């Protein structure tokens, strides 16, 4: 053999060795506020997998705005698992790429949401404007901080929560439209994302109330500014179900379907439920839900499916171009 | 063809064409292909929507205002840096480049902090009844910030290369200071200043990161076109997003062409 053949053989051997030796890994593409939850969960899961199978694996994690993360998957980021904010985003993945079937949401319990959350009010210490429920937000002089629902997934939950309240309380869609229209007249700035809105309220001291995810609100109170803010739970709010799914074709391609499936199942296990509760998400397992009942006050929660006929409908009616949200701002 | 002193014309021209196609032309062609896939009626509906029209006004208006401010004050900064010696000059010189280096989101957050209702500048300005953050003025402030280096860095080297003897000659021939500036300095600096102006403008039109924090993103009032493009993407409406991108590109192209024409005209006029 001449030197070229040797070189080729050596390279080939090295490459084969590499493939055999490299740990299998999965990529979980998620949105911003789950960072702390999945940091803790990934550690527990890799330990669990090692114990069960003896195999060492790596779980990689990516966080960002939910819409941006979804577009990354659609444009070809080969994630094995998606854990996003809205079913609407995962629907878009199914529709645009076909890497998951249309009925993905029925594959796991509780609409594929292993934990839930809701929308609450974050107010300043002592609740100086005495804001107790959605009606109080329309009082003259009250400033409401919420991001732009056209650019922020979280903001869409805020909007729908207000709508669901008004529709229940005042009994008609027309009244709900007026209520939400008035509510947005109290909003002095529409940040492009949820983190931006939190900064406006917490750091810049603008506004009397921030509409926020319950998990984010609890996090800011317990980690950032204990004592500076209070949480107010309205009488009616929306049940936010951040869904999870295996991205079938990507996982098949990587040969990681078994890990990806086990990863999501583990979210529903006692360990996963415990971590969800600790990170301020409401566990779906009744046992852990009652364990964390002290953290999460009881609210009358409305789901997107029953109040709005699903996310596709809600998006089309309210947030797409020319929808109800755009009409609020149309100059007369 | 006459023989050239430096060989390699064919090769370098070929490479330059290939390179600009790869980096500029192909992505832009893709943008147009996507945007035009909407078809005439839909395309027109998207780009002539009242909300889109309001956003063009803000995006181009604020970018032009910012570039004009930079033309004036950036020119002044360049003058001071070239013509005077003072302690700390190198630091000021280095500061000019900061807007280049700073991630734009950081700039946006810092400016909003300063000009917000409770900020160092925002609070006293508010007392005077002037709101900056979350108004078109705030957008202009952000676009002025990011555009500053362009004017300074294009005018500075030309100014440094000007022969001082020209000014002395003008003075000795009886020109007063104003005449020296207007007849000798100004024509020499104008082409470079216009280039800086065009660059600052072009940079500002497409700016997203710093503006979204300070603008407040209120539909019809403080919504820039790039934000509208972003909100189309959130609806997975890639074609409509591309259509708005096309409009921005065409507008900018025409404006840059006009500025270049103006520059050509001034050079010719100065020469003739």
Image (cartoon, rainbow, N blue to C red):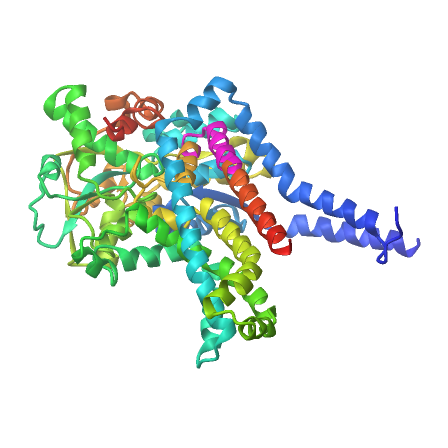
Residue A114 point in image, percent of width and height? 33, 37
Residue at the front extreme, as displayed: B174
Closer to the camera, B185 or A331? B185
Q: Quadrant of residue A297?
A: top left
Residue at the bottom extreme, as displayed: B87
Residue B203 point in image, percent of width and height? 49, 49
Q: Is residue A154 visible?
A: yes
Q: Taking A224 as reference, is A56 left or right?
A: right
Q: Is residue A266 visible?
A: no
Residue B239 in the magenta stretch? The answer is yes
Q: How many marks?
A: 0
B122 versus A91 height, above or below: below
Q: Quadrant of the C terminus of chain A?
A: top left
Residue A103 in the magenta stretch? The answer is no
Residue shown at 45%/30% (left/top)? B236
Residue shown at 21%/40% (left/top)? A187
Residue B238 point in image, percent of width and height? 49, 30
- The stretch in magenta equals B233-250
């Amino acid at each position: 053999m001449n030197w070229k053949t040797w070189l080729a053989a050596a390279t080939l051997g090295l490459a084969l060795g590499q493939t055999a030796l490299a740990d299998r890994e999965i990529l979980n593409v998620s949105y911003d506020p789950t960072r702390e939850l999945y940091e803790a969960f990934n550690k527990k899961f890799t330990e669990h997998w090692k114990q069960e199978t003896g195999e060492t694996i790596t779980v990689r994690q990516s966080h960002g705005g939910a819409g941006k993360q979804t577009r990354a998957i659609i444009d070809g980021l080969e994630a094995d698992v998606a854990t996003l904010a809205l079913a609407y985003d995962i629907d878009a993945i199914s529709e645009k790429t076909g890497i998951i079937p249309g009925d993905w949401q029925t594959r796991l319990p509780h609409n594929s949401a292993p934990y839930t959350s809701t929308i609450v009010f974050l107010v300043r210490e002592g609740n100086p404007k005495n804001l107790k429920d959605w009606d109080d937000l329309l009082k003259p002089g009250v400033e409401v901080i919420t991001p732009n629902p056209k650019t922020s997934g979280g903001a869409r939950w805020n909007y729908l929560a207000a709508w669901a309240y008004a529709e229940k309380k005042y009994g008609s869609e027309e009244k709900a439209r007026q209520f939400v229209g008035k509510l947005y007249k109290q909003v002095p700035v529409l940040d492009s994302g949820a983190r931006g809105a939190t900064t406006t309220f917490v750091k810049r001291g603008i506004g009397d109330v921030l509409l926020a995810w319950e998990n984010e609100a609890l996090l800011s109170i317990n980690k950032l500014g204990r004592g500076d803010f209070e949480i107010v739970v309205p009488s009616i709010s929306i049940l936010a179900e951040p869904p999870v799914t295996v991205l079938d074709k990507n996982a098949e391609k990587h040969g990681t379907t078994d890990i990806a499936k086990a990863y999501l199942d583990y979210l529903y296990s006692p360990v996963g439920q415990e971590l969800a509760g600790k990170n301020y998400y409401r566990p779906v397992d009744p046992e852990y839900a009652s364990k964390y009942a002290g953290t999460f006050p009881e609210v009358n929660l409305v789901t997107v499916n029953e109040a709005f006929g699903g996310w596709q409908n809600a998006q089309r009616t309210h947030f797409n171009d020319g929808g109800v949200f755009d009409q609020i701002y149309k100059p007369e | 063809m006459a023989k050239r002193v430096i060989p390699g014309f064919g090769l370098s021209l070929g490479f330059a064409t290939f390179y600009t196609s790869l980096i500029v032309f192909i992505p832009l062609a893709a943008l147009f292909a996507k945007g035009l896939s909407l078809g005439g009626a839909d395309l027109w509906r998207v780009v002539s929507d009242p909300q889109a029209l309001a956003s063009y006004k803000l995006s181009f208006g604020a970018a032009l205002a910012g570039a004009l401010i930079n033309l004036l004050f950036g020119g002044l900064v360049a003058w001071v840096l070239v013509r005077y010696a003072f302690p700390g000059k190198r630091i000021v010189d280095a500061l000019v480049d900061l807007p280049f280096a700073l991630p734009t989101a950081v700039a946006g957050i810092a400016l909003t902090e300063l000009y917000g209702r409770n900020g160092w500048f925002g609070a006293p300005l508010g007392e005077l009844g002037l709101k900056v953050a979350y108004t078109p003025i705030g957008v202009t402030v952000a676009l002025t910030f990011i555009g500053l280096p362009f004017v300074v860095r294009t005018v500075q080297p030309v100014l440094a290369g000007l022969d001082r003897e020209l000014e002395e000659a003008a003075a000795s021939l009886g020109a007063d200071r104003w005449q020296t500036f207007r007849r000798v300095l100004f024509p020499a600096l104008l082409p470079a200043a216009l280039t800086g102006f065009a660059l600052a403008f072009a940079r500002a039109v497409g700016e997203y990161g710093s503006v979204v924090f300070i603008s407040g993103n209120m539909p019809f009032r403080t919504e820039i076109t790039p934000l509208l493009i972003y909100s189309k993407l959130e609806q997975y409406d890639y074609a409509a997003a591309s259509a708005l991108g096309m409009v921005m590109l065409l507008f900018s192209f025409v404006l840059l062409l006009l500025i270049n024409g103006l520059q050509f005209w001034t050079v010719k006029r100065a020469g003739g």
